Amino acid sequence: MTPRRSEGFVRMPDAEFEAILTRAAEEGAKRALADVGLDGDDEAALDIRDLRSLVDCIRLVRRTAMQTAVRMITTGVMLALLAGIAIKLKIFGGGP
Protein backbone atom coordinates (compact mmCIF):
# COMPACT_ATOMS: atom_id res chain seq x y z
CA MET A 1 0.00 0.00 0.00
CA THR A 2 1.45 3.34 -0.98
CA PRO A 3 0.82 6.13 1.47
CA ARG A 4 -1.23 9.14 0.36
CA ARG A 5 0.40 12.57 0.31
CA SER A 6 -1.48 15.58 1.46
CA GLU A 7 0.05 19.01 2.02
CA GLY A 8 3.60 17.67 2.25
CA PHE A 9 2.74 15.06 4.87
CA VAL A 10 2.52 11.31 4.40
CA ARG A 11 -0.61 9.67 5.74
CA MET A 12 -0.91 5.98 6.52
CA PRO A 13 -3.27 3.87 8.57
CA ASP A 14 -2.58 3.72 12.31
CA ALA A 15 -2.15 -0.07 12.25
CA GLU A 16 0.54 0.15 9.58
CA PHE A 17 2.32 2.95 11.47
CA GLU A 18 2.27 0.89 14.68
CA ALA A 19 3.69 -2.10 12.81
CA ILE A 20 6.55 0.01 11.44
CA LEU A 21 7.30 1.41 14.90
CA THR A 22 7.26 -2.06 16.45
CA ARG A 23 9.62 -3.46 13.82
CA ALA A 24 11.99 -0.50 14.17
CA ALA A 25 12.03 -0.84 17.96
CA GLU A 26 12.78 -4.56 17.78
CA GLU A 27 15.59 -4.08 15.26
CA GLY A 28 17.05 -1.25 17.35
CA ALA A 29 16.99 -3.37 20.49
CA LYS A 30 18.65 -6.27 18.67
CA ARG A 31 21.35 -3.97 17.31
CA ALA A 32 21.97 -2.48 20.77
CA LEU A 33 22.29 -5.95 22.32
CA ALA A 34 24.65 -7.00 19.53
CA ASP A 35 26.80 -3.91 20.14
CA VAL A 36 27.37 -4.93 23.76
CA GLY A 37 27.87 -8.61 22.94
CA LEU A 38 24.56 -9.98 24.20
CA ASP A 39 23.02 -10.96 20.90
CA GLY A 40 20.99 -14.11 20.75
CA ASP A 41 23.12 -16.65 22.57
CA ASP A 42 21.73 -18.68 25.45
CA GLU A 43 24.29 -17.32 27.88
CA ALA A 44 23.14 -13.70 27.51
CA ALA A 45 20.56 -14.03 30.29
CA LEU A 46 23.15 -15.68 32.53
CA ASP A 47 25.59 -12.85 31.79
CA ILE A 48 22.98 -10.25 32.77
CA ARG A 49 22.22 -12.12 36.01
CA ASP A 50 25.93 -12.32 36.80
CA LEU A 51 26.37 -8.59 36.18
CA ARG A 52 23.41 -7.75 38.42
CA SER A 53 24.81 -10.02 41.12
CA LEU A 54 28.20 -8.33 40.81
CA VAL A 55 26.63 -4.88 41.13
CA ASP A 56 24.67 -6.02 44.19
CA CYS A 57 27.91 -7.31 45.78
CA ILE A 58 29.67 -4.01 45.07
CA ARG A 59 26.82 -2.11 46.72
CA LEU A 60 26.99 -4.41 49.75
CA VAL A 61 30.76 -3.95 50.07
CA ARG A 62 30.43 -0.17 49.79
CA ARG A 63 27.69 -0.08 52.44
CA THR A 64 29.68 -2.35 54.79
CA ALA A 65 32.84 -0.24 54.33
CA MET A 66 30.93 2.93 55.21
CA GLN A 67 29.41 1.31 58.30
CA THR A 68 32.83 0.06 59.40
CA ALA A 69 34.40 3.51 58.93
CA VAL A 70 31.63 5.17 60.95
CA ARG A 71 32.01 2.60 63.74
CA MET A 72 35.78 3.07 63.86
CA ILE A 73 35.48 6.87 64.02
CA THR A 74 32.82 6.63 66.72
CA THR A 75 34.94 4.20 68.74
CA GLY A 76 37.98 6.48 68.42
CA VAL A 77 36.03 9.50 69.62
CA MET A 78 34.62 7.56 72.57
CA LEU A 79 38.10 6.28 73.54
CA ALA A 80 39.51 9.80 73.35
CA LEU A 81 36.72 11.09 75.57
CA LEU A 82 37.27 8.30 78.10
CA ALA A 83 41.02 8.93 78.11
CA GLY A 84 40.41 12.64 78.65
CA ILE A 85 38.03 11.94 81.54
CA ALA A 86 40.51 9.49 83.09
CA ILE A 87 43.33 12.02 82.90
CA LYS A 88 41.13 14.83 84.26
CA LEU A 89 39.98 12.71 87.22
CA LYS A 90 43.51 11.34 87.77
CA ILE A 91 42.26 7.78 87.81
CA PHE A 92 45.58 6.19 86.77
CA GLY A 93 47.77 7.64 89.41
CA GLY A 94 48.45 11.01 90.71
CA GLY A 95 50.59 13.51 89.05
CA PRO A 96 51.76 16.78 90.48
Image (cartoon, helix red, strand yellow):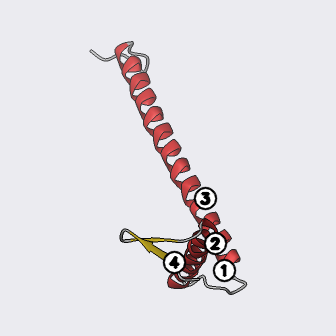
The alpha-carbon separation of the residues under discs 3 and 2 comes to 12 Å
Q: Label for residue 3?
A: 4
- SS category of the residue bearing label 1: helix
The alpha-carbon separation of the residues under discs 3 and 4 comes to 50 Å
The alpha-carbon separation of the residues under discs 4 and 1 comes to 40 Å
Three-letter amino acid code of the residue under disc 3: Asp
The alpha-carbon separation of the residues under discs 3 and 1 comes to 18 Å
Residue at image coords 43%, 17%: 91
From the image, state whether disc 2 or disc 4 is nearer to you. Answer: 4
Give coordinates of residue 20: x percent, y percent.
57, 75
Along the polypeptide, which appears first: circle 3 or circle 4? Answer: 4
Along the polypeptide, which appears first: circle 3 or circle 2? Answer: 2
Q: Label for residue 48?
A: 2
Q: Within 10 Å of the Cα at label 1, are there few (<14), some (14-19), or many (20+) other Cα atoms?
A: some
Q: Within 10 Å of the Cα at label 2, are there few (<14), some (14-19), or many (20+) other Cα atoms?
A: few
Three-letter amino acid code of the residue under disc 2: Ile
From the image, state whether disc 3 or disc 2 is nearer to you. Answer: 2
Residue at image coords 46%, 44%: 69
Q: Are dots 2 and 1 in contact, CB under 8 Å?
A: yes
